[in-house]
Amino acid sequence: MQGASAIRVILINLIVVVVLFALIIAGYFYYTNSTNYVTTQDAQVSGTIVPITVPFTGTITHWYAAVNSTVNQGELLGNQSNSSVFALNPGLSQMIGNNKSMLNKLKDEETVTSPISGTILQNNVAVGQVVEPGQVVAEVVNLGNLNITANILETEIRHVSVGQTVNISIDGIPNTSFKGTVQSIGDTTTSAFSVIPNPDAAQGSYTAVAQRIPVTISLNGGYAGKALVPGMSAVVSIQVNNNNS
């Protein structure tokens, strides 16, 4: 019985030592990460999405752009007939008067071209549809020039500076890590552009909430062969090394 008790005491002490050792290791990694890294899951793949519009009101007669298709800058995406402009705007003839060049312009068929080389992300028109200036008929993005936008808490942004190294993981591409560099730091918080006003501020009261500041991170070494698209969720760890106070 004494031997069994001694073994039990040894096992208990061994378990305590293992648990303490694990806690020490966990504490070390927590301290190291909190000191040397600023980490956030509030990040996503982003890129410059360019809207495609038309110069005049008219009807789409041909449309060749398909979602996910690759296009070159200046490539023909479709044709627009302006013959319906006068029907839609009866007073236009008097405004133009005898300006023959403008009259011919409105009667001729317009071409819709891509402003950049890239991939069509969204297609908002169909043949026969009437379109107007300012209406986004399609959207194109250069998938070879993507970056990461990470929203960093205002309490941690002081540790972040341009040029710092960033470790990146993309939710949609598991078991793959990317390297990046802090390219720019926003001059305002994300809430400053919110379409929903702060109800507390509107009522004359305010509750302090930690705000987030957008940080743009460039992807180092490229990502050829990786299915990165704008909007993918990401996790970033910015290596700050506690250089900033």
Image (spheres, rainbow, N blue to C red):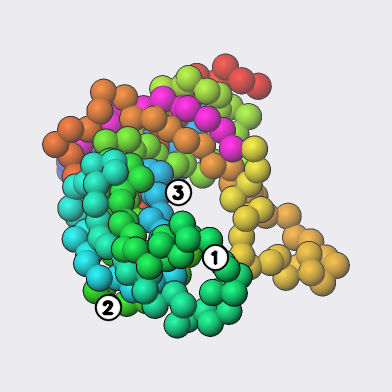
User: In front here: 167 or 213?
Assistant: 213
**Residue 108 to residue 129: above or below:** above
Pointer 2 residue: 128
Q: Residues within 10 Å of mark 1 (few under 14, many from 20)?
A: few
Q: Earlier in the sequence, mark 1 or mark 3?
A: 3
Is residue 206 found left or right of 167 in the rendered image? right
Q: Which residues are magenta?
A: 174-186
Three-letter code for the amino acid on which mark 2 is drawn: Gly
Q: Is residue 112 magenta?
A: no
Using the image, tell me which numbered label, if any, was put on residue 42: 3
CA distance separating discs 1 and 2: 30 Å
Three-letter code for the amino acid on which mark 3 is drawn: Asp
Q: Residues within 10 Å of mark 3 (few under 14, many from 20)?
A: some
Secondary structure at badge 1 equals loop
Task: Please tell me how many numbered marks the rendered image carries.
Answer: 3
Pointer 1 residue: 98
Q: From this viewpoint, which residue is outermost toward the top?
A: 243
Q: Residue 40 at x, y = what percent? A: 45, 42
Front of the two marks 3 and 2: 2
Quadrant holding the N terminus: top left
Q: Residues within 10 Å of mark 2 (few under 14, many from 20)?
A: some
Quadrant holding the C terminus: top right
Secondary structure at badge 2 equals loop
Q: Earlier in the sequence, mark 1 or mark 2?
A: 1
Q: Is residue 244 at least partly visible in the picture?
A: yes
> What's the residue at 46%, 65% (across, down)?
103
Q: Earlier in the sequence, mark 3 or mark 2?
A: 3
> What's the residue at 25%, 56% (across, down)?
77
Is residue 69 found left or right of 21 in the rendered image? left
Disc 1, disc 3: CB below 8 Å?
Answer: no
Front of the two marks 1 and 3: 1
